[in-house]
Image (cartoon, helix red, strand yellow):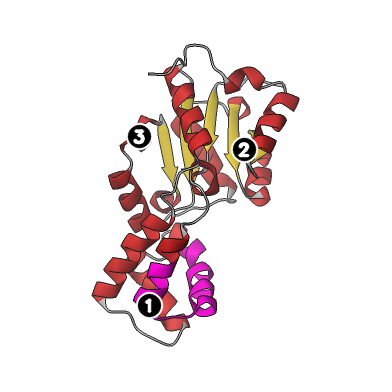
Amino acid sequence: MTSISSVLFDYGMVLSAPPDPAAWQRMREITGLDEKALHHGYWQFRHAYDRHDLNGLAYWEQVAASAGTVFTREQVTKLMEADVDLWTRLNAPMVDWARRLQRAGIRTGILSNIGDAMTDGLLKKFEWLSDFHHCTWSYRLQLAKPEEAIYRAAAEGMGTAPEQILFIDDKIENIEAAQNTGMQAIQYRDHDSFVREMEQRGLAALLNPVGAASK
C-alpha cells in the first residue's frame, strides 16, 4: 500500500455529527410542512443545490413548489440559517483527529457536496475550517460526488498524488468513485469501526501522528 501523505475528509456525517433534530423542527415550523413533505422536498433538490444547478434561494423555491406552496424571502432567510444549524453538530473525534494531523504537518482537506449558502454559513461559524490545506466545495466547481472529476480537482488542490490521499466519506458510492480515481478510501460508519479499519489497513500510526501533541 502506498504511504499516505494527505487526508481528505467529507464534511457531513464525517466531520459533522448527524443532523440536529432541533434545527429540523425549526425548519418544519418555518415552512409549516409536515415531516413527509419537508423531507421529500429537502432531499429531492439537494444534489442540484450541491452542484450549483440551484443557488440557495432557488433551492428553497423548489422545495416550496414541491409542496404546492411559496416561501417568503423572510422564510427563506430563516430556512438557510436553520439549514446551517442542522449540520453544525460536530463529530468531535474526527475534528480532533484532523487538528492533530495538522499539528503534525500532514496535509488535510475537505471534499464536500455543499451549496453556496451552506458553505457561507459554515465558514462564518467555524474558523477552524480555514486550517485545512484545501477545501473543495462542490458548488464552486459545479460538480458533485460521485463525479470523478471532483476527486481529481481535490487532489490537484491538495497538491498530492491521488494514491497518497486517504479519503473518508459516509457514502459507499463516494468511496467507490474515490477509489476509481486512485485514492485510498474508507467508508465512515461510526468511530469505533473506523479506528478498527485503520488498524487493519496498517494505518494505526496515522491515528496518533508524530508531532501532534495537544496545544
Image quadrant occupied by the N terminus = top right
Q: Which label sits in the foreground, 2 or 3? A: 2
**Residue drawn at point x = 68 percent, y = 49 percent:** 172
Q: Nearer the viewer, residue 76 or 164?
A: 76
As shown in the figure, which amino acid type bears the numbered disc 1? Thr
Horizontal and vertical percent position of residue 175: 65, 44
Q: Nearer the viewer, residue 14 or 49?
A: 14
Image quadrant occupied by the C terminus = top left
In the image, which disc is placed on residue 31?
1
In the image, which disc is placed on residue 191?
2
As shown in the figure, which amino acid type bears the numbered disc 2? His
Horizontal and vertical percent position of residue 12: 50, 49
Disc 3 is placed on an element classified as helix
Mark closer to the chain start, 3 or 1: 1
Local crowd size for mark 2, using a 10 Å CA cut-off: few (<14), some (14–19), many (≥20) = few
Which quadrant of the structure image shows residue 78? bottom left
> Which residue occupies the extreme left position in the image?
74
> Which residue occupies the extreme top position in the image?
211
Local crowd size for mark 1, using a 10 Å CA cut-off: few (<14), some (14–19), many (≥20) = many
Disc 2 is placed on an element classified as helix
* Left or right: where 200 falls relative to 120: right
